[in-house]
Image (spheres, rainbow, N blue to C red):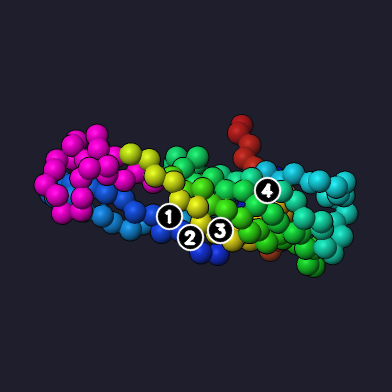
Amino acid sequence: MSLGLPLKTATQLKYNASDGTVRTTKSNPENVYVFFDFFPRKVDLVKSPPVRWPSLSLGIPLANQPFNRATAGLSVGFNIWGLRIAPFAGVLFLREFRPNTLGVGAKATSSQLQSDLVPHHNYRLLVTLNFSVKDAAKLVKSSTGNKTADPATGKGSGGSKSTSQ
């Protein structure tokens, strides 16, 4: 399992009629993706070689409605100074809701627009930089580990334990 950060996000159209007229807005949702990696060959994930064989990766964003932005593709792993990264390239299966009969600029209420929306599928290229969940946990732990120092010794406590009497 790995986490992926898109290098560029796909623009998504949204429709609203809050002022009585159908209007579009563009949104660029910034999503972190969680990937499930499938290896066609046996791979040692503990002792990572400098270059890892390609894997089939399936991903969904860690956001609302994740199955409207699912992705599938290939990633190749690299071990650079102990950090395992895997560039990913694949297809983004983007599901948008567009008006069926109402056009942009048409007079409609919000409820009329909502009842007129139908799903529309787009397919786009998605490129992400993936890293393992374990490596991400190590980075977060190391960056937050020694935030407080003991005034008597000047050394970091590495955590906060409290005792009650």
Earlier-in-chain disc, 3 versus 2: 2
Q: Is residue 131 left or right of residue 113?
A: right
Vertical relation: 100 (above or below) 128: above
Amino acid type at image mark 4: Ser
Amino acid type at image mark 2: Thr
Measured as percent of width and height from the top left, residue 110 is found at: 18, 40
Residue at 44% over, 46% down: 121
Would you identify the image quadrant in which residue 81 lies?
A: bottom right
Residue at 55% over, 59% down: 125
Q: Is residue 20 left or right of residue 165?
A: left
120 or 133, nearer to the observer = 120
Label 2: state its secondary structure.
Answer: loop
Q: How far is the residue under mark 3 from the one under mark 2?
A: 8 Å
Does the magenta-highlighted stretch encompass residue 33?
Answer: no
Amino acid type at image mark 1: Pro
Earlier-in-chain disc, 2 versus 1: 2
Q: Which corner quadrant holds the N terminus? A: top right
Vertical relation: 110 (above or below) 142: above
Q: How far is the residue under mark 4 from the one under mark 3?
A: 12 Å
For disc 4, the marked residue is 57
For disc 2, the marked residue is 9
Q: How far is the residue under mark 2 from the one under mark 1?
A: 7 Å
Q: How far is the residue under mark 4 from the one under mark 1?
A: 21 Å
Tell me the tag on residue 126. 3
Tell me the tag on residue 12. none
Q: Is residue 50 left or right of residue 57?
A: right
Q: Nearer the viewer, mark 4 or mark 1?
A: 4
